[in-house]
Image: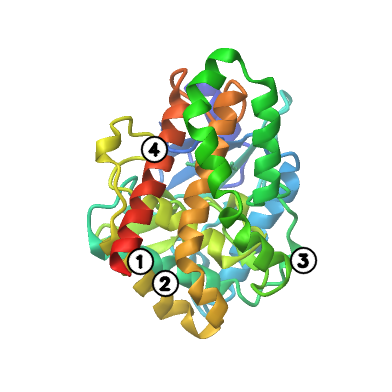
């Protein structure tokens, strides 16, 4: 993106800083994200929110702002400036909304960058897994008294298994012969896991596992750490909405315990790391165990399997749909992501069974 255009967008917001330059951060699959540096030594995250995927961007931004406000209310007597280094803080545009709608129809928002922070795409240290578990636990504790009815469903049925199966079934109907052929190897596996993969949804629907505010995109790259690998906060709150904690626990495990990146093509590198699972679970439970029911606790391993599966299914569906949802870098990118997740399920199942 041209410096002049990004500078103009950045200057719509009320930050009182002078743009020097920017770089693109490429880890997300949906939005476009940039890091902006300023003369004042403060940096900002400038993000174009993909409105083809997120149908109600003002509602989404409102969710994010309300969530940050709630999390900030847990800290007392900390000056705003300091708080903006602990909790995501949104910068307003001059007319006081927290997003800018450009004439071309694109929505933008700006956040204060948290200095000296890092993210991880892959975990290579048990300590990081443990810190990550505590971080999610803190997020869920911090939002446990936040009335989830204040939030819109940013993407309805986001982690709803029946909905994802329906999307998959219709993608199978409309897919090209070539893509169908390449995906065929996985159709049996998907069918064989169907019943088990609906268990959590049934527990949610019956109310046995309660609905509350959840993050819904807890992959490890959405956890911010300081340079000593102590957790700072969860980032990317685009999908914060009502859900069950199993979505968040499982989606985090999906990335933390994968010994390779989500799109690694060499499947021999993709294994489930049970030590990281235990470390993450330890950190998570230290923060949440008093609020979890016996049934909630019992289903944590199934949450991991279910969330790995739902991502495999979504990547496969998008491959069959000719890549209309996720950003891809080459024609089989989504298929490779799906294969990677299916391999991870296999490895997870082996490891868990061995450990019984
Ligand atoms: C998408 O764009 P990003 O990286 O924040 C997706 C998540 C997936 C993730 C897989 C709104 O998140 O559900 O887990 O890719 N977000 C949406 O890496 O679909
Ligand atoms: Mg996200």
Residue in the foreground of this view, choosing between 311 and 85: 311
Mark 3 near mark 2, Cβ–Cβ under 8 Å? no
- Identify the residue at horizontal 41%, vertical 57% (top origin): 253
Provide the residue designation for mark 3.
149
Ligand 1 contact, mark 4 (Cβ < 8 Å): no
Mark 1 near mark 2, Cβ–Cβ under 8 Å? yes
First along the sequence among labels 2 and 4? 2
Q: What is the spatial separation of the Cα atoms under label 1 and label 4, in whole angstroms? A: 21 Å
- Identify the residue at horizontal 63%, vertical 20% (top origin): 175
Residue 52 shows up from this direction: no
Q: Secondary structure at mark 2?
A: helix
Q: Residue 143 appears at what percent x and percent y? A: 60, 71
Residue in the foreground of this view, choosing between 346 and 28: 346
Mark 2 near mark 4, Cβ–Cβ under 8 Å? no
Q: Residue 277 appears at what percent x and percent y? A: 34, 63
Provide the residue designation for mark 4.
340
* In the depicted structure, whether residue 316 falls above or below residue 239: above
- Identify the residue at horizontal 53%, vertical 82% (top origin): 294
Provide the residue designation for mark 1.
280
Mark 4 surroundings: few (<14), some (14-19) or many (≥20) residues within 10 A:
many
Mark 3 near mark 1, Cβ–Cβ under 8 Å? no
First along the sequence among labels 1 and 4? 1
Q: Which mark is residue 284?
A: 2
Q: What is the spatial separation of the Cα atoms under label 2 and label 4, in whole angstroms? A: 25 Å
* In the depicted structure, whether residue 283 falls above or below residue 249: below
Task: Specify how the rendered protein is coloured.
Answer: rainbow
Residue in the foreground of this view, choosing between 318 and 126: 318
First along the sequence among labels 3 and 2? 3
């Amino acid at each position: 993106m041209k410096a002049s255009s990004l500078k103009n967008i950045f200057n719509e917001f009320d930050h009182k800083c002078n743009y020097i330059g920017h770089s693109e951060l490429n880890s997300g699959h949906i939005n476009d994200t940039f890091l902006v540096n300023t003369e004042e030594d403060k940096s900002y995250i400038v993000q174009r929110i993909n409105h083809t995927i997120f149908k109600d961007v003002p509602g989404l931004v409102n969710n994010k702002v309300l969530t940050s406000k709630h999390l900030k209310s847990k800290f007392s007597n900390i000056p705003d400036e300091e708080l903006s280094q602990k909790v995501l803080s949104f910068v307003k545009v001059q007319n006081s909304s927290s997003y800018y709608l450009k004439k071309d129809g694109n929505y933008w928002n700006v956040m204060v960058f948290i200095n000296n922070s890092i993210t991880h795409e892959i975990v290579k240290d048990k300590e990081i897994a443990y810190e990550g578990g505590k971080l999610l636990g803190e997020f869920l504790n911090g939002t446990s008294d936040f009335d989830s009815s204040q939030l819109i469903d940013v993407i309805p049925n986001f982690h709803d298994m029946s909905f994802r199966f329906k999307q998959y079934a219709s993608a199978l109907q409309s897919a090209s012969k070539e893509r169908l052929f390449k995906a065929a190897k996985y159709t049996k596996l998907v069918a064989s896991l169907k019943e088990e993969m609906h268990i959590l949804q049934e527990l949610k629907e019956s109310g046995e596992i309660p609905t509350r505010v959840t993050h819904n995109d807890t992959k490890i790259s959405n956890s911010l750490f300081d340079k000593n690998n102590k957790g700072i906060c969860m980032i990317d709150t685009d999908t914060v909405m009502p859900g069950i904690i199993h979505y968040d626990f499982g989606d985090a495990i999906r990335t933390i315990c994968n010994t390779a990146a989500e799109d690694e093509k060499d499947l021999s590198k993709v294994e489930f790391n049970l030590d990281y699972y235990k470390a993450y679970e330890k950190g998570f439970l230290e923060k949440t165990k008093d609020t979890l029911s016996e049934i909630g606790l019992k289903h944590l391993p199934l949450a991991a399997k279910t969330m790995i599966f739902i991502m495999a299914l979504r990547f496969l569906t998008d491959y069959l749909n000719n890549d209309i949802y996720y950003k891809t870098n080459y024609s089989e990118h989504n298929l490779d992501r799906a294969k990677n997740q299916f391999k991870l399920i296999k490895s997870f199942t082996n490891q868990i069974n061995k450990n019984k």
